[in-house]
Amino acid sequence: MIRRYTTQPISRDTLQQLLEAAVRAPSPHNRQPWRFAVVTGDSRRRLAQAMGDQLRLDLAADGVPAEAIERDAGRSYLRITSAPASILASLSLRDMDRYPDERRNAAERWMAGQAVAAAAQNLLLRATELGLGACWMCAPLFCGVAVSQVLALPEDWEPQALITLGYPADEGRDRERVPLGDVVMWAGDAAS
């Protein structure tokens, strides 16, 4: 994961290649429920400010000390504004199936969310192939209204993740992973 970038801009062609990779992801019923907003220029600052404002409100309501709130909000602001570009991944249920019962509607929403996540993963893999660094931020889930307002998103777009992008300023750092034995169960013939 890369969180620090050089100031080198990302070409529109490169951003287009990332988006082309994203939309090749699998989706339920081939409905392609993903939507993307490319965030560059002054939009980065306005987005970071709006997200930070919501973060401050949430943390203050949690009773977090003011200095810790400002530290978190400042770190988030820098992550967003120092990236030459970001891509907001959103979910739209507009074309998804609707059912008379909540159980299947909930499954439909989950499937759409999984498709958006798969599209974001495709984007991240392509970014790596193109020599870019990236960081997936789930913060838009906590401040979807603010994100939607700042970016003037269509009404049916639900912000899911912000992927910051740029040419890496450093090597980043590996995150420790849980051992496979703690998260994998072998069932059937593969167990032997």
Image (cartoon, rainbow, N blue to C red):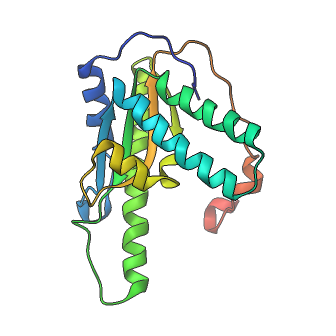
Residue at the spot x=35%, y=43% of the render? 150
Residue at the spot x=78%, y=45% of the render? 65
| Number of numbered callouts drawn | 0
Q: Nearer the viewer, residue 70 or 184?
A: 70
Q: Give residue 23's quadrant in the image.
A: top left
Residue 147 drawn at (x, y percent)? 40, 47
Q: Nearer the viewer, residue 162 or 51?
A: 51
Quadrant of the image containing the N terminus: top right
Residue 96 drawn at (x, y percent)? 26, 69
* Position above or below: 94 against 40: below
**27 relative to 160 in the view: left or right:** left
Visible residue check, residue 4: yes
* Position above or below: 78 against 58: above
**16 relative to 64 in the view: left or right:** left
**173 relative to 143 in the view: left or right:** right
Residue 32 drawn at (x, y percent)? 26, 55
Visible residue check, residue 138: no
Quadrant of the image containing the C terminus: bottom right
Q: Nearer the viewer, residue 181 or 190?
A: 181
Residue 190 drawn at (x, y percent)? 63, 60
Residue at the spot x=51%, y=16% of the render? 5
Q: Nearer the viewer, residue 16 or 138?
A: 138
Residue at the spot x=24%, y=60% of the render? 30
- Outermost residue toward the bottom? 100
* Position above or below: 30 against 163: below
Q: Give residue 28's quadrant in the image.
A: bottom left
